[in-house]
Image: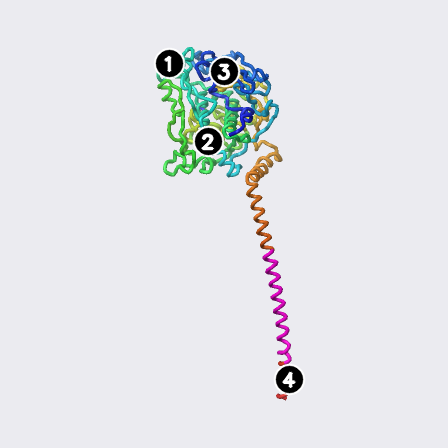
Amino acid sequence: MRSLCVPLLLLQLIGTCLCQFPRLCANSEGLRTKECCPVWDGDGSACGALSGRGFCTEVLVSDEPHGPQYPHSGIDDRERWPLAFFNRTCRCAGNYGGVNCGECRFGYWGSNCAEYRESVRRNIMTLSSAEQQKFISYLNLAKNTISRDYVIATGTRAEMGENGENPMFSDINTYDLFVWMHYYVSRDTFLGGPGNVWRDIDFAHESAAFLPWHRVFLLHWENEIRKLTGDFNFTIPYWDWRDAQSCEVCTDSLMGGRNSLNPNLISPASVFSSWKVICTQPEEYNSREVLCNATGEGPLLRNPGNHDPNRVPRLPTTADVDFTVGLPEYETGTMDRLSNMSFRNVLEGFASPETGMAVPGQSTMHNALHVFMNGSMSSVQGSANDPIFVLHHAFIDSIFERWLRTHQPLRTSYPRTNAPIGHNDGYYMVPFFPLYRNGDYFLSNKALGYEYSYLLDPGQRFVQEFLTPYLQQAGQIWQWLLGAGILGAVITALLAVLIVVARRKWKRNQRRKRASSYGERQPLLHSSSEEGSSSYQTTL
């Protein structure tokens, strides 16, 4: 199977989602001139050239040959990306980044992008309830907020006219922007005529770019959430599914439980039950020769565990992950889903995590989770509709990071030529703007400004997973804690006063009783003695 409001200055200092398509360039003028070099407001020049942030220049694409899997040429807008749309874009200097060089590249902050900062992605199961709910609220906010800066293409470049006289772009919400991107990068190629498509093509799956492409995808997604919410400390959580027997995150308090009336739907107690999916009908698009236009196509589907057990006998184990990380070669042979002993192919799920050999008809590792979810997440083009996609791919990225740290490969370990189209080292990732080469992201996440909590050393891990969350929670409720402390002190003082007063009163009562008792007993004793003596004498 194919795998599937804040100050303006702060907005300028973070890396934002610079992807398909920048609104400022998605118009007739941009299409006619084939130039996407927006002005940076900081100095009023294109690409911030006056400030030395970048400059507008010709796009030079790689001419290295790709593999035989795609035998066509000049019929797909994604070939030689992004030349079908633009041949001039901003090239940013130093640590500057963004479509107009007005932001910083991943991991750098500050007005001059000179401050390196490392964020930590944590296991969603170790987050506090408040943190989990904040994450879910951010997802829902993204689902219900139109992207301010980006639009999607609803037609091919040819349909937009030779000089761009018929621009075909559409608004889209922030979450679905990324769903559409995942669809667009993996869609079939139209060959002309209803249903006449080339299916053996994917610019982000089934070959070398699978891991670098999804790494950049998650970084952009993460930064877009920061931009939307103003929470610049936000990081994507991951789900560590090793040795899982069920979907541990499929609860109403997390990613949505199972609907009791229809097991294919999400529980109505979850906010995700109201979500509508997009880009889930590839056969319909192919038959009509149209692109997905992001129209809602029904509810989010998920029925974890009720999948074909012959295809996925079990979920991946710790032993599976360890074997995969131990494979020394990133790519082998044909560099596609038939590759043997390839780290990428085993991790993606087309080969066995026990032998390293390709297993046609079965899905392992990454693919196994997609099939196991048995719903929207199980079809590659629409898989990002399910928010579990983000948690899953964050953990896949962490395994990629483990492999990079274990083997410390040279850049030459990444294929420079003959990989399937879109996957060579020098190929620009579809459909990102600004432009990113595959090979540039074949490197440790330390260089990109983030880390995974379970990969930290024990001391750092304790701080990140236990101490930091505690201090953050304390910081959020310090006023309540202070008030509770003051109230507790007042109550304690009152109780102490009451106890002292009560004790003193009790002591006074005791003394009075003793005094009263002594004054009464003496006469009785005398009387008794006298009476006793008299009686005793009388008796004698």
Numbered circle sitting on residue 103: none
- Tags 4 and 2 touching, CB below 8 Å: no
Q: What residue is drawn where x is 48% and y is 28%? A: 366
Residue that numbered label 4 is attached to: 533
| Horizontal and vertical percent position of residue 9 | 55, 25
Check disc 4: other Cα within 10 Å, few if <14, some if 14-19, many if 20+: few
Colour scheme shown: rainbow
The region drawn magenta spans 497-526
Residue that numbered label 1 is attached to: 192
Q: Secondary structure at mark 2?
A: helix
Which residue type does callout 3 highlight?
A: Cys
Check disc 2: other Cα within 10 Å, few if <14, some if 14-19, many if 20+: some
Q: Quadrant of the N terminus?
A: top left
Residue that numbered label 2 is attached to: 141
| Horizontal and vertical percent position of residue 411 | 58, 19
Which residue type does callout 2 highlight?
A: Leu
Nearer-N-terminus badge (3/1): 3
Q: Is residue 149 above or below residue 242?
A: above
Nearer-N-terminus badge (4/1): 1
As measured in the structure, the alpha-carbon distance from the residue carrying label 4 to the one carrying label 1 is 137 Å
| Horizontal and vertical percent position of residue 43 | 56, 18
